[in-house]
Amino acid sequence: MTAIFQSDEAGWSGYDAAFVVDALASPGPFNVPNRIGRPLTAEMVSNAAASGITAVNVTASGSGETPDEAYARSLEHLAYWQREVESNPDVLSLAASVSEIEAAKSAGRLALIMGFQDTVMLGTDLARMDEFHAQGVKIVQLTYNLPNLVGEGCLSPGNGCLTDFGRELVAHLAAAGVLIDLSHCSQRTTAEAIAAAPGPMSITHSGCSAVYEHPRNKQDAEMRAMAERGGVIGIYLMPFLNAGGPATADDLYLHIEHAVNVCGEEHVGIGSDNSITPTVDDETYRATLQQFADERLRLGIGAPGEHEVLFVPDLNSPARMRMIADGLLARGHSEARVEKIVGGNWMRLLGEVW
């Protein structure tokens, strides 16, 4: 078992005072077969407390073969996170407003933002979205990797458009103060959603196609259009950052720096797509990963490269956000820029949308 992490307070002196936001992460298991329903372990809770992360966007959406099944599972997932917060009140809190994130920071708790990575659970019923919003869902990704009733995913062969219902949903989410996420959307759906939205949107977890061409990474034109509307892109800690083997911290920094050059430093953040607790990279994990990736390919939702470890080995630590900050400073980025990238930009965007 991984040892419980204890911060040594080394590195950037401004980290502990900064708002540190990971736009896609979890205090529990992530990128492994669905373990929803199992309580967080003491290790997970301790690592969340020691990480220095202020807030994370947690995937609370459920999947299913039908919208009704996905709807029921999404309700179960939301109830699960409510129970976990109630069981760990000194470490975790729910956040549906910037003031609640600020309160969590003051209290030394990790704020959990409820987010969805698909809209299949809605069918075409906007009342369901209102129900989820009332339960604290504040970030919604329009599609996952495949087409749905809203638009096309990034693995869709046709690069299809935002649908009429998708346009209706975009307007509905914007009016409700829900941050729209375009991370897994096709290029055309991304472009049309940005054009249709009355305000800023996000790409919570992706990379830059100009650095490494991959279906899950975004083209410069997509990132630039998103930034021009005030949005933020979060760079992930996934194997899709390079072409050969596990991604490295240097790969991550190259994607961050390219995004800064394209979008401006006010529009780049982190969305790790990882658990806060590090992955134990042993034979059991490798076997489970292969089964997980094989099943996703069978379902048509697996992206190229998912058989590689789904984290950055030299950032496989609860201290990863501190390590990223220190790494960027070592590469010559200013403290002001680093503070924006590790969370300040997300706080600004959430304040504008929510």
Image (spheres, helix red, strand yellow):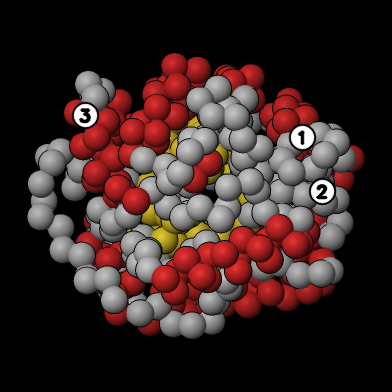
Residue 189 got which mark?
1
Q: Residue at x 28, y 56 (%)?
A: 317
Element on which disc 3 rests: helix
Identify which amino acid the numbered label 1 is placed on. Answer: Thr
Q: Are marks 2 and 3 in contact (CB under 8 Å)?
A: no
Q: What residue does disc 2 label?
A: 147
In the image as oriented, which residue stretches furthest toward the top? 261
Quick one: quadrant of the N terminus? bottom left
Badge 1: how crowded within 10 Å, few (<14), some, or many (20+)? many
Element on which disc 1 rests: helix
67 left or right of 266 in image? right
Identify which amino acid the numbered label 2 is placed on. Answer: Pro
Identify which amino acid the numbered label 3 is placed on. Answer: Leu
Closest to the observer, 250 or 330 = 250
Q: What residue does disc 3 label?
A: 329
Q: CA distance from mark 2 to mark 1?
A: 10 Å
Q: Quadrant of residue 195?
A: top right
Badge 3: how crowded within 10 Å, few (<14), some, or many (20+)? some
